[in-house]
Image (cartoon, rainbow, N blue to C red):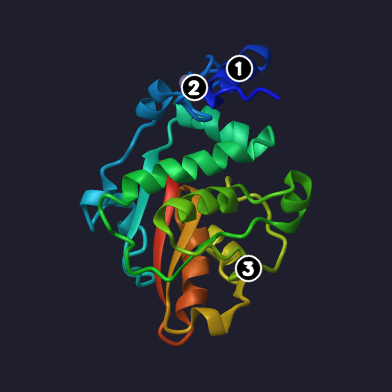
Amino acid sequence: MEHFPLNVIHDISNIIYPKLCAACHETLNKHEKVICLKCQLGLPKTDHVLYDDNPVAKKFWGKVPIERALAMYHFHKTSRLQEVMHALKYKGRQDVGIRLGNLMGYHLQQYQLFADVDYLTAVPLHKDKLEKRGYNQSGVIAAGLSEVLHIPYDADILQRSLFTETQTKKSRMERWENVKDIFEVQKQDLVTNKHILLLDDVITTGSTLEACAVKLIANQGTKVSIVAVAHAEL
Ligand SMILES: [Zn+2]
């Protein structure tokens, strides 16, 4: 049997099944993966990597001690990021989450902010949502980030215990009452004296991440850093 060079095979399969950008739906060229270069460059990056007192870090001041906290992108309703997150959450596109995590990793690794982190984990999804979607979208992004930063990802460090109603119409205090005890650390031995990087997809008030962080730092010697994919300014 004759062997075709790989690029020829790619070109042929792309004619039969053109691969489209998950954000703009234009055809990807053979060097592009999942999200085209133009859309990648159009994702609205924050400058949080440069400042310890960035707006996401400040959300936790006076509430829970966090080593470093940042969001990678701004969350605008009309941005390419919205389209990317939609594909991940509602169209079963786990490849989009992996790619997004990879892209975050390429950016973050230039700054070495999380070089001393031992484990990466994600805010657990509610059980009903997990069953419906089949995966935790934040966990998928964390897995993609883990590939690039070489920090082991562990999906089961935290677990979500109770049912919670939707957060959107509540005041900050009501939200906190709603979430403060819904997470538990189920791998206490693993996190003892370790630095944990906690990932969530979108940060708004920060109360969900705060609830997770409080439970983590209750363990002996555990330190917590936070990375959100996007910051939704209120
Ligand atoms: Zn695109």
Kind of residue sitting beneath label 3:
Asp
Q: Position of residue 6 (x, y in %)?
A: 55, 26
Distance between the Cα atoms at labels 2 and 3? 36 Å
Q: Which residue is mark 3?
A: 156
Q: Secondary structure at mark 1?
A: helix
Rendered image: mark on residue 14: 1
Q: Position of residue 225 (x, y in %)?
A: 38, 65
> Can you tell me whether the CB of the residue at mark 3 lies under 8 Å from the nearest atom of ligand 1?
no
Which mark is in front, 2 or 3? 2
Distance between the Cα atoms at labels 2 and 1? 8 Å
Kind of residue sitting beneath label 2:
Lys
Q: Position of residue 33 (x, y in %)?
A: 50, 30
Report which quarter residue 103 is drawn in. top left
Distance between the Cα atoms at labels 1 and 3? 38 Å
Q: Secondary structure at mark 2?
A: loop
- Dot placed on the residue nearer the N-terminal end, 1 or 3: 1
Q: Which residue is mark 2?
A: 30
Kind of residue sitting beneath label 1:
Asn
Give the residue at the far front of this rendering. Answer: 1
Q: Residue at x 68, y 13 (%)?
A: 16
